[in-house]
Image (cartoon, rainbow, N blue to C red):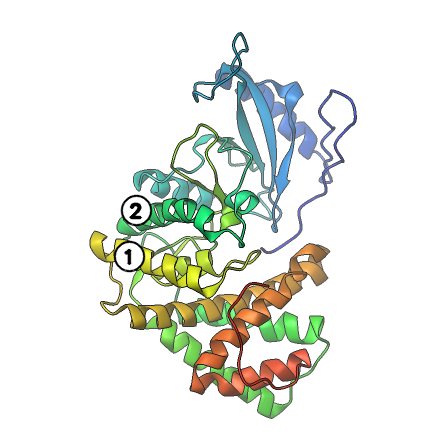
Amino acid sequence: MTASSPPVSPVSTDSQPPVIRWDIPGRAADFAHWLERIAPMHRLRPESVRAASADASFRRYFRIDTDAPSTAGIAQPSGTAQPPVTRIIMDAPPDKEDCAPFVHVAALMAQADVRAPQVLDWDREHGFMLLTDLGRQTLLDIVDPARPEAAQPLFLQAIDALVRWQLISRPQELPPYNDALLRRELALFPDWYIPCHRGLALNAAQRQTLEQAFDLIVRHNLASANVYVHRDYMPRNLMVPEDGGTALGVLDFQDAVYGPITYDIACLMRDAFISWDEEFVIDMTVRYWQAARKAGLPVDQDFGAFYRAVEWMGLQRHIKVAGIFARITLRDGKPKYLADAPRFITYIRTTAARYRELTPLLRLIDQIEGTPEVNGYAFGRM
């Protein structure tokens, strides 16, 4: 979530895939040469390249057909051929995106037996990558906050994958999620959200309140044991298998770190784009905690203590993401992200209202948002 992606031309109305737009001089030729080189080996059909998606960085993704028949076992009408296998192409200009962490973490995911894209080819010089395709439907696409009972089996799959990922953790393999990084992330809120989105300048007393709150948040979060942290483990990055399998696919893991065990479960249940009633949040967090304990992961032996730690970790993330979404919107021209800011402010208020030492932060947030002081907050869906 650092920069905008080059725009992709709109989908054409005829049967031909749309022409991909290239804003970097010479990049179209580099792409064509790379694709021509690898196409025979991977049975690719270059004429089928079309836009798949773009994210909040400079990366964008294309989908391409192959001549290989599908072996996924998806039921087809009698006499109908299986659809061809598709692949994903990552376009990541090397002067703006470093693909090495993606390749490294993809290998760790495979080691953990977590379903993630396999790197089939990597043009490191030009920043093109051929990946296996995990499908078109995310967990976010199919869950409904009004029907948590239907979502539960899918979230249990997400928990299972998370536990397996955390079980292979070891120090020095990934960057540390340390004091410096936690504080850099928190600083996005006063650097972008407050002055650029809200148009406010904090006075000395308000700055001190924020700094003291940040000190508390960092201290609480660093008290948790460390494991591998995906860092964006949310339904939008979890792919539902198209073959009827029970293993969710995991995407967007290139920013993984070694840090607090509370982070990814906080991220999963306090999502950037969808909110759940607290009953469901607690239920799924309990189930993660039970699975983690059974697997021997270093969670608190008391669930109450663990849940409090998850709340403090979620608070750090929500403050950070509010700042990131403001930056993406105001610097990179992607307004859809900041539309979810009220969800984060609700998360922040909810947690701050639970803990007496966070009362000054709660009052400051109300001042920033222009919200009358309220005696309590509900966790419920927005």
Determine the residue positioned at 69% across, 83% down.
201
Residue type (three-letter) at the residue carrying disc 2:
Arg
Most foreground residue, 369 or 34? 369
Labels 1, 2: front one: 2
Residue beneath disc 2: 164
The residue at the far bottom in this view is 205
Which image quarter: residue 157?
top left
Label 1: which secondary element: loop
Residue 275 locus on image (x, y percent): 54, 60
Residue 176 appears in the picture as rendered: no
Determine the residue positioned at 36% across, 53% down.
174
Q: On residue 14, which mark appears?
A: none
- The CA distance from mark 1 to mark 2 is 16 Å
Residue 236 appears in the picture as rendered: yes
The residue at the far top in this view is 79
Residue type (three-letter) at the residue carrying disc 1:
Pro
Mark 2, Cα crowd under 10 Å, few <14 / some 14-19 / many 20+, is some
Residue 213 locus on image (x, y percent): 48, 82
Q: Is residue 228 above or below residue 71?
A: below
**71 horizontally vs 93: left or right:** left
Q: Which quadrant of the figure contains the N terminus? A: bottom right
Q: Is residue 289 above or below residue 184?
A: above
Q: Which quadrant of the figure contains the C terminus? A: bottom right
Residue beneath disc 1: 171
Q: Is residue 56 above or below residue 199?
A: above
